[in-house]
Image: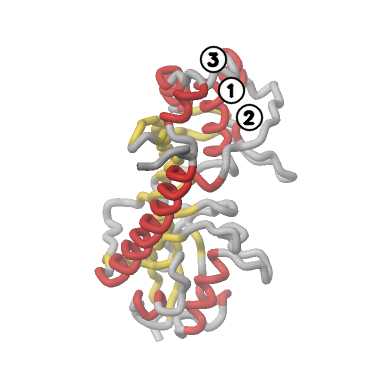
Amino acid sequence: MTKSKFLFKFYYIGTQKYYGSQRQGDILTIEHTILKALEKRNYIQKLKDGDFEFASRTDRFVSARGACFTCITQKEPILMEINSILPREIGIWAYTEVPLEFSSRHNAIFRHYIYIVSTPMSYFQKISDINVDVMRKACKQLEGRHDFVNFFKREGDLIKSIRDMDSATLSIQNDYLIFQFKSRSFLRQQIRRMVKKILELGKNEITYDDFLDLFDKSKVISYQPADPRGLILWDIKFDDKIKFIEDPKAKERRNNFFLTKEFDYGLRYQLFRTLQQDNFS
C-alpha cells in the first residue's frame, strides 16, 4: 500500500477535562482524544507508523479554531467519519494531502493567536481609567525581533528566547478588548504573559518604563500569566501551495456547536445581569 500523508485543520474548546493539547501518557488531552478516534476508525494502526504531529501545543483551557496536525493514514480521510466519534467540542473540518517529509510544525509560516480579555471595557471604565492608547503603543513595541526571556515560562531546559513578532494589535469589539499576535513561533505562555503586562500598563499598575524593562535579558522578572481561557489558536498559515479541502458538513457541525454555546452562555449572561437589578418592570 502506498503511504499518504495528510494535513488536517481542526477546532477544540479547552474545557476543564482536557489537560492541554499535547498527549501525556494516559492523561486526557486533545491529542489523545484525536488519536483514539483515528485508531477506532482504522486511519492509523500503530502510532509510530502514523508520523503523527501537532503543529502547535497549547496549555489547559486554551481553545483553537484553526489548529493543525499531520498524519500518515491507512485510507483517504472522510472527516465526518472521524468526527462522528469525537466529542462535540473537538472537530476536524478541513484537510489536504502533503508530501511525506512535510512537517505541520516546522513548515508553518506563522501562527495567529487571539486573546479575548474577560472583563468588558464598560466595566473597566466604571471602576477605573484604562489607557487603550498606551496599550496599543506597547503592542507596537513587541513587534520585530526581541529576546522574550521575561515573557515566557522558564523551565528546566535552556531555550532560545529570541523570536520575531510579525504583528501585535489591540482592538475593541462588542465591548471587549481583543489582542491579536502573529509569529512563526511562540514560547510557552508568551502570549498570556504579554497580555498580562499590557493590561497592567493600561490600568496604570506599571509604568511604560517598567514594561520596557521586560526586554532587558539581564533582569529576571517573575509574574503570573493572564487567564488561559481567553486564548484562541486562531489559525496556522502554510505555504500558498497548501490548499485545504473544507468539508461542508464538518463546518456545519462546528458552527452549530459554536452557536449552541453562544445561546447557552448568552442566556446565563442575561440571567445574572437581570438578577443584579433591585427593580424590574
Mark 3: few/some/many CA within 10 Å (<14, 14-19, 20+): some
- Element under disc 3: helix
Earlier in the chain: of badge 3 and badge 1, it is 3
Earlier in the chain: of badge 3 and badge 2, it is 2
Quarter assignment of residue 257 = bottom left
- Residue at 46% x, 85% y is 42
Residue placed under numbered mark 2 in the picture: 150
Mark 3 to mark 1 CA distance (whole Å): 12 Å
Residue placed under numbered mark 1 in the picture: 215
Mark 1: few/some/many CA within 10 Å (<14, 14-19, 20+): some
Mark 2: few/some/many CA within 10 Å (<14, 14-19, 20+): many
* Amino acid type, callout 1: Phe
Q: Is residue 243 above or below residue 277?
A: below
Mark 2 to mark 1 CA distance (whole Å): 7 Å
- Element under disc 2: helix
Q: Is residue 135 left or right of residue 46?
A: left
- Where is residue 176 drawn, in percent x and y? 40, 36
Earlier in the chain: of badge 2 and badge 1, it is 2
Residue 216 or residue 19, whichever sits in front: 19
